[in-house]
Image: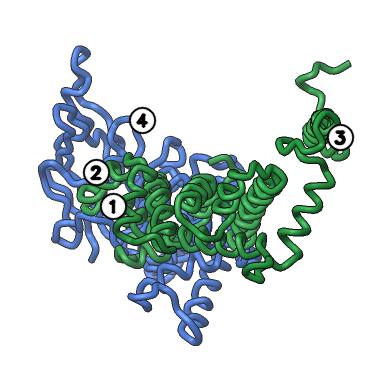
Chain colours: A blue, B green
């Protein structure tokens, strides 16, 4: 399974210690939410999972092997902004990932191959609720729709891990709750591990199965950069992969069998 | 009465205000032209409207007695060919080298300093070198344009590439793109409309280098003609040629802008968001 194991992880920029002594186990299929004050290393942590930053010391293992030191197709990402390509329309944005795989030289497919990829992309887009906007450009979409597109775009690669860097931070509250439902649906259907940074603690509690709080345990007022942040709380929030509905059904069935 | 900073002209008002300076310039010119011609009918400095019409019809619509060519059109064709060739070559080099410098740090470390230095060399100062190396033919004139505007285009494309949001570069990698695919499907299309903008900006310099090269060594071309007839103080040819060059420059700029809007409709929307 695609478990993530982190041992004794440190991240420093010169004298500035950002993260210190991070130890963490994440099982495949968890929905991990990361909360903490700004500037406490959540994003740095996510970047190390993504591969754009490397740990200074310690180990970051995916399936027992060190995680790749550059971004790759096994780890999808959705940023708060600029996650989609403005020069491609909605369906082309989603097709792009598959076209990269199928056509190494041109990065562009034609004919039957293209049609097959397009069908997959359209199916994904319908799932995220963008089936009506296939030929629109991202600039014609609202913020929420752009994020839906970014999620669909990442999902077509079927990544093991999906990294979300405050994906709903810029959205209106109503749209945000729609997006919560969407991301939970996707998480339940696929066996994907999700890491999501959020500023909203209640979002962290309501979505995640494992809540990580980043904070500095020690603080030197004269030298604020002397000590880095670490994970001060690692809380199993206890949402199961099942919906409450199926959960109750299972329990009643078990009860019946026990009788 | 609104404050003057809040008063906006309507469509008609805009047109009238826009045309007004041209009308004033024209009126002022012909007033002084008349004054001078009244004193000396052979005055060459400010020809009358009639002599402009005569010269234009002579240059544009009558074959030259010696060569049989229509001079204005022959000059225009020669100049536009040089300009088009020079700008096209520069744009191609600018695009390829600019993208490579912008996106590949190893290339940037290797080439960027040289480009910076080359861009500081005044192209006109090395025009004699070009004449020596490439001869007095077409090649040296095209080369002057290329040398003159390519460094600017390279650096502009490079900056545009480096200004792309890092997010989309990372996103493309998480979609499995290798470096080549990333350049071809993400960087190139993102930068092409910006290359057109850069070419529009560089057209002014391109004309400058073209006319300079033609003035020094040529047998036809718009710049050649202007400098040729200067000996006879033929303002009746020089002024229409200047207006014609300006019109051509304006048309090119206009066409490039329309091309960008037509081919990259998403680009203007991008800019509209004020990113």
* Residue B156: x %, y % from top left: 42, 46
Task: Classify residue A181 as left or right of residue B37.
Answer: left
Q: Report in which chain the residue with disc 2 lies.
A: B
Q: Report in which chain the residue with disc 1 lies.
A: A
Label located before the other in sequence (4 or 1): 4
Vertical order, B76 against A51 (above or below): below
Residue at the spot of label 2: B113
Q: Is residue A67 visible?
A: yes
Residue at the spot of label 1: A50
Q: Classify 10 Å Cα crowding around label 3: few (below 14), some (14-19), many (20 and above).
A: few
Residue at the image position 86 percent from the left and 31 percent from the top: B38
What is the CA distance from the residue labelled 4 to the residue labelled 1?
A: 19 Å
Q: Are marks 3 and 1 in contact (CB under 8 Å)?
A: no
What is the CA distance from the residue labelled 2 to the residue labelled 3?
A: 51 Å
**Identity of the residue furthest to the bottom in this view:** A112
* Residue A60: x %, y % from top left: 17, 51
Q: Which mark is residue B13?
A: 3
Q: Nearer the viewer, residue A68 or A229?
A: A68
Query: Callout 2: helix, strand or loop?
Result: helix
Q: Classify 10 Å Cα crowding around label 4: few (below 14), some (14-19), many (20 and above).
A: few
Determine the image quadrant of residue B23: top right
Of badges 3 and 4, nearer the viewer stands 3
Q: Which of A121 and B80 is in front in this view?
A: B80
What is the CA distance from the residue labelled 3 to the residue labelled 4?
A: 53 Å
Q: Classify 10 Å Cα crowding around label 2: few (below 14), some (14-19), many (20 and above).
A: few
Q: Which of A173 and A18 is in front in this view?
A: A18
Residue at the spot of label 4: A38
């Amino acid at each position: 399974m695609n478990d993530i194991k982190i041992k004794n992880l440190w991240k420093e920029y010169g004298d500035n210690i950002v993260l210190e002594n991070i130890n963490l186990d994440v099982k495949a299929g968890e929905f991990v939410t990361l909360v903490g004050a700004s500037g406490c290393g959540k994003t740095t942590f996510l970047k190390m999972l993504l591969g754009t930053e490397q740990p200074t010391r310690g180990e970051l293992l995916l399936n027992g092997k060190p995680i790749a030191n550059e971004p790759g197709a096994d780890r999808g990402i959705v940023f708060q902004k600029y996650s989609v390509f403005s020069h491609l329309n909605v369906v082309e944005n989603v097709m792009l990932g598959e076209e990269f795989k199928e056509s190494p030289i041109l990065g562009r497919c034609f004919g039957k191959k293209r049609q097959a990829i397009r069908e997959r992309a359209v199916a994904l887009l319908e799932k995220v609720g963008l089936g009506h906007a296939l030929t629109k450009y991202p600039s014609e979409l609202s913020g929420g729709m752009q994020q839906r597109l970014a999620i669909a775009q990442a999902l077509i690669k079927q990544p093991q891990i999906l990294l979300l860097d405050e994906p709903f931070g810029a959205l209106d509250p109503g749209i945000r709750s729609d997006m919560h439902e969407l991301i939970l649906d996707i998480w339940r259907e696929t066996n994907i591990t999700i890491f999501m940074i959020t500023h909203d603690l209640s979002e962290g509690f309501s979505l995640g199965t494992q809540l990580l709080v980043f904070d500095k345990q020690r603080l030197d007022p004269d030298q604020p950069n002397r000590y880095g942040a670490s994970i001060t709380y690692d809380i199993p929030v206890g949402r199961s992969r099942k919906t409450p509905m199926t959960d109750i059904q299972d329990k009643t069935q078990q009860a019946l069998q026990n009788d | 009465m609104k404050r003057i900073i809040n008063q906006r002209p309507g469509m008609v008002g805009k047109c009238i205000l826009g045309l007004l300076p041209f009308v004033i310039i024209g009126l002022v010119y012909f007033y002084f032209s008349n004054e001078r011609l009244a004193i000396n009918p052979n005055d060459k400095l400010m020809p009358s409207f009639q002599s402009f019409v005569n010269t234009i019809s002579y240059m544009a619509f009558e074959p030259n007695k010696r060569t049989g060519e229509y001079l204005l059109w022959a000059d225009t064709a020669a100049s536009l060919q040089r300009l088009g060739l020079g700008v096209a070559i520069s744009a191609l080099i600018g695009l390829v080298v600019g993208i490579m410098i912008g996106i590949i740090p190893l290339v940037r470390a290797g080439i960027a300093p040289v480009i910076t230095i080359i861009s500081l060399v005044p192209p006109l100062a090395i025009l004699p070198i070009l004449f020596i190396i490439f001869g007095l033919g077409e090649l040296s004139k095209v080369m002057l344009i290329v040398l003159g505007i390519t460094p600017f285009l390279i650096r502009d494309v490079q900056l545009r590439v480096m200004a792309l949001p890092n997010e989309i570069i990372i996103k493309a990698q998480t979609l499995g793109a290798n470096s080549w695919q990333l350049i071809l499907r993400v960087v190139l299309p993102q930068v092409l409309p910006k290359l057109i903008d850069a070419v529009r900006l560089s057209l002014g310099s391109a004309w400058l280098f073209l006319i300079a090269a033609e003035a020094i060594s040529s047998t036809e071309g718009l710049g050649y003609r202007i400098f040729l007839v200067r000996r006879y103080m033929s303002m009746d040819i020089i002024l229409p040629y200047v207006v014609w060059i300006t019109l051509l420059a304006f048309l090119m700029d206009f066409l490039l802008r329309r091309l960008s809007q037509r081919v990259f409709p998403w680009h203007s929307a991008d800019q509209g968001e004020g990113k």
